[in-house]
Amino acid sequence: MTTRALVDANVLYSRTLRDWLIMIQLESEGGIYELCWTEDILAEAITRFRDHNPTVHGRVIAKMHDTVTEYLGVGRIDDYRIDGSFPGADPHDQHVHAAAIAAGATYLITDDPGFRSPGIDLDSLPYEVHTPDSFLVLVDDSAPHDVRAVTRDQERYWDRKPGSKTLVQALQDAGCPDFAQRVLEHLCQLPADDTPT
């Protein structure tokens, strides 16, 4: 049975994180994890993106939506019950907790500090809470060959985009310094004929 990981809106919001998580899932053919999400989570990610990018064209928003629904469609959690069992103080985190339970998720990937507040005993939750950085490092520990393959593909893609950030810089900017270091190590190990020119 595939390990399920619920991805929170603050993670889906970031193109860098969204791309890495989806590409690794696709590279492993779902063998490492299956990302789960809800319409609430996707709507929140899109709303935050729009709030921070008020002039972006509609096609960017549509692509964000379509990427998630196309590549992660089977991971959509349609029904979950908010039953008051979330021990955190933020009522807006209850739907994420409920969805993780309904999904049978092993992991919750979030940058929301509400899941690490002093009132929450992380060991009492039925899932592990990870930041995107800690989750991606865990994935690299388990399947470095898949991460290296995605690193190669990402490097080839972004190298053709003039003025784009390096993979390492983009990951650091997305709050993943430890995984950025892992990606740098993979880049250094790619054969010379695999590196872009």
Image (cartoon, rainbow, N blue to C red):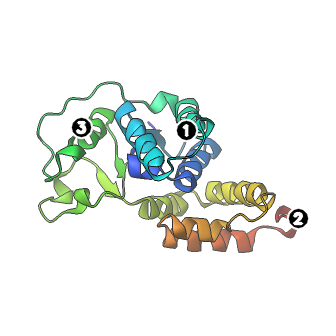
Question: Residue 101: x, y in percent?
Answer: 26, 38
Question: Residue 65: x, y in percent?
Answer: 53, 34
The disc placed on residue 193 is 2
Residue 4 visible to the viewer: no
Residue at 57%, 74% in the rendered image = 181
Residue 129 visible to the viewer: yes
Per the image, label 1 sits on a secondary structure element best described as helix
**In the rendered structure, which disc, 1 or 3, sits on the residue that comes first in sequence?**
1
Kind of residue indicated by mark 2: Asp
**Distance between the alpha carbons at the discs numbered 2 and 3:** 47 Å
Q: Quadrant of residue 78?
A: top left
The disc placed on residue 98 is 3
Is 11 situated left or right of 83 in this image?
right
Kind of residue indicated by mark 3: Ala
Is 147 situated left or right of 77 in this image?
right
Is 180 situated left or right of 7 in this image?
right
Residue ID for mark 1? 61
78 or 150: nearer the viewer = 78
196 or 47: nearer the viewer = 47
Is 194 situated left or right of 53 in this image?
right
Kind of residue indicated by mark 1: Ile
Which residue is most to the front? 55
Q: Residues within 10 Å of mark 2 (few under 14, many from 20)?
A: few
**In the rendered structure, which disc, 2 or 1, sits on the residue that comes first in sequence?**
1
Q: Nearer the viewer, mark 2 or mark 3?
A: 3
**In the rendered structure, which disc, 2 or 3, sits on the residue that comes first in sequence?**
3
The disc placed on residue 91 is none
Per the image, label 3 sits on a secondary structure element best described as helix
